Image (cartoon, helix red, strand yellow):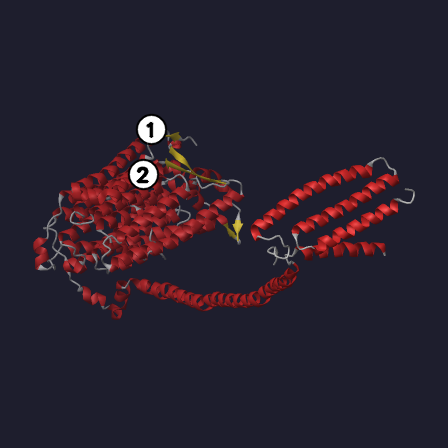
Amino acid sequence: MEITEVGYLRWIPLLPLVGAAVNGVAGAVIQRRLGKRAISVLAVTPVLLAFALSVQTFLDLRALAPEQRFLLDRVMPWLHVGTLVADIAFWVDPLACVMLLVVTGVGGLIHVYSTGYMHEDASYWRFFAFLNLFTFAMLTLVLGDSLLLMFVGWEGVGLCSYALIGFWWREHVNTTAGNKAFIVNRIGDFGFLLGILLLFWSTDAAGHGSVVFRELQEHASVLAGQTLWGVPVVVLVTLLLFVGATGKSAQIPLYVWLPDAMQGPTPVSALIHAATMVTAGVYMIARLHFLYALAPATLAVVAGIGAATALLAATIGLVQNDIKRVLAYSTVSQLGYMFVAMGVGAWSAGIFHLMTHAFFKACLFLGAGSVIHGLGGEQDMRRMGGLRTRMPVTFWTFLVATLAIAGAPLTAGFFSKDEILWKAFSSPHGSALLWLVGVAVAGLTACYMFRQLFLTFFGESRADHEVLHHAHESPPSMAVPLVLLAAGSLLAGFVGLPQALGGANRFEAWLAPVFAHGHAAVAHAASHGPHEVELELTLMAVAIGVAITGFLVAFVLYQRRSVPVAALADVLGGIPYRVLLNKYYVDELYQAVFVRGTLLLSRLGAWIDATIIDGVVDGSARLTALAARLNRLFDDYVVDALVNFCANRTYDVGLRLRRVQTGGINAYLYVIVGTVAFVLIARLM
Amino acid sequence: MEGIGLTHFLVVGLVVFALGLYTVLTRRNAIGILMGIELILNAANINYVAFGRYAGVAADGQVFAIFVIMLAAAEAVIGLAVVLGIYQNFESIDVEATDALRY
């Protein structure tokens, strides 16, 4: 593997970090002294510079031969412990480059948008400090050359996500949502960490222990044949890592935090909870595709979870009334699509959808933000309507993005979604069932997205007169990113024009060197026979048909209103509607099982702690005190008594003996003479 | 002169020693005690000289006697100095009175 070493990669993550540090440390002062404009400049410039560097990276990569497209920037040694070697080093291959462009490009636009959206906020500087910090963490995640460095970014984005969801912390519901996101993510991260540890442990046991992606890819084969508790190690590793992905990328069973994450400011929802962070799981699987390709069992799980999540979230999205929550469930659903792609080994299709989704979902969120901004904070679609004429830019961009997500032909979403559906059908890991679910989700997506469009922009306005009076188009700082993202939603698909439609699929070709290893299993899918082209076009037509059906349902129900929606809600005694409105009661289920269970467990733990552990501790303390008291008695009455006895008797003897010392010289003389005489006499006798 | 032999000298020495010892033990006057000590030393001298003469071994006895005389002189000096010191402290040289060095 030829690697070109460059020195500028480090600046891509570091520039936003500098921005975060400056705004985070001195932001309050800068904002007071120099105004919000200075904060904006400090926050937006690093991200735009990072974008420029990312473009440079792309150009540099393109200048290299396809097989040698690796750029590496070794910054410094980090952890060298035993056989574990992890350095702070950033590397870029075509896959990372795609993510890089999405994160810095879409992220940059959202930064610009935020300068308008957050303009009235007193904590303007805090918002941008976190937004920049997030960008830094996300870029570390993308560029890190080892799983450990990726994990650093992985945790970093989670932290920033938590901080930004609870950005308006004065409202309890926001901080609760932040906590929920953080805790649910931590559960996933725990699995991710276990996966890293198991991976290193197993490869190390085989003599090739490493956490660096390049080396892992080179030695992935050592995992083949290894088992743990009767399960292939590679399946365990990939499943554990996938647990991390379900947390970060909001898949069943850990998706519950993402809808609640909409409590954060809308640009945050767009950047973190739609375009970038939540795609980290998809990126991670694509990054480690060489491991997943070795574990068909895991792939089946990934595809299954993805399809189930896509369907579940899409059905919930049908009945939600909060403009952002609909988009949140839509994001969960679209992420499900990406995981289906990963699960059938269609790595580049998944990444393609990741990229197009970043455009249209960011555009949708920013459009929703624009609406919320224009209506003074209103988020309930039942109190919107008729905004088409009042907010034309928002409306048209929203329409374009809606078309894209619904899969209208020739928009970005159409190409990427179709690619996934085709791979879900044709890949050896795929099946007709996966395709069917995917198509159904496409129909549902079209339905709930047009429902949203109709409720928000068409019909009579249902807003208060006062609110409506102030309804206004957003400032250019918000409108320009919207237009650019809408353009992306329209055009981004053409880089991946499928061969079936006469395109070259340059996107897939660009990623091909990365996935060359993992593609062995699905290689045949790439070769299109004439029969397959026909099949693909047929499937495409079916998908379009289903999407149009979805659109028509929404049109009839919410635009024409020829069938009263209320009547539909009462079908089957209103049970299906209530189940959907309450999101399948999953939150309630989790509350009852996990939260209550945890509380119960902790209460039990507290009881054990207070009664048994404390009892043992207190008991031993009491025993010690008792022993000490006994010890003192022994000391006082036995040891001291002995010592005193000796001393007193010695004193007594001395008292008596001292009488010998009379001081009279005669007495001494008598004694001397007497003694001498006695000795002499004794000798003579 | 034939009648006088070693025994006579020893008897004289014994008498002098006994008198000296008696003096030492009975005198309360410190100077008297010192005088008794002189008698005892001289009794020893008589024995030395007598044994020196009659045992006929060179002049060892006589030499020792001279040593003892010299020692007695030194002892008298120190003894008298002590007595003088006692007198200065107690205004008496009665050994019964100088019993401050007791328990």
The residue that appears at 45% across and 66% down in the rendered structure is A614
Q: In this orientation, does residue A488 appear?
A: yes
Q: Chain of mark 2?
A: A
Instruction: Name the amino acid, label 1.
Output: Ala
Residue under numbered circle 1: A63
The amino acid sitting under disc 2 is Pro
- Tag 2's secondary structure? helix
Chain letter for mark 1: A
Can residue A282 be seen in the rendering of this structure? no
Write down the residue under mark 2: A13
Q: Which residue is at the far bottom?
A: A573
**Do circles 1 and 2 both sit on a common chain?**
yes
- Location of the N terminus of chain A by quadrant is top left
Horizontal and vertical percent position of residue A639: 59, 64
Q: Is residue A644 left or right of residue A57?
A: right
Which residue: 63% across, 62% down?
Answer: A650
Q: Residues within 10 Å of mark 1 (few under 14, many from 20)?
A: few
Image point (20%, 49%), residue name: A123
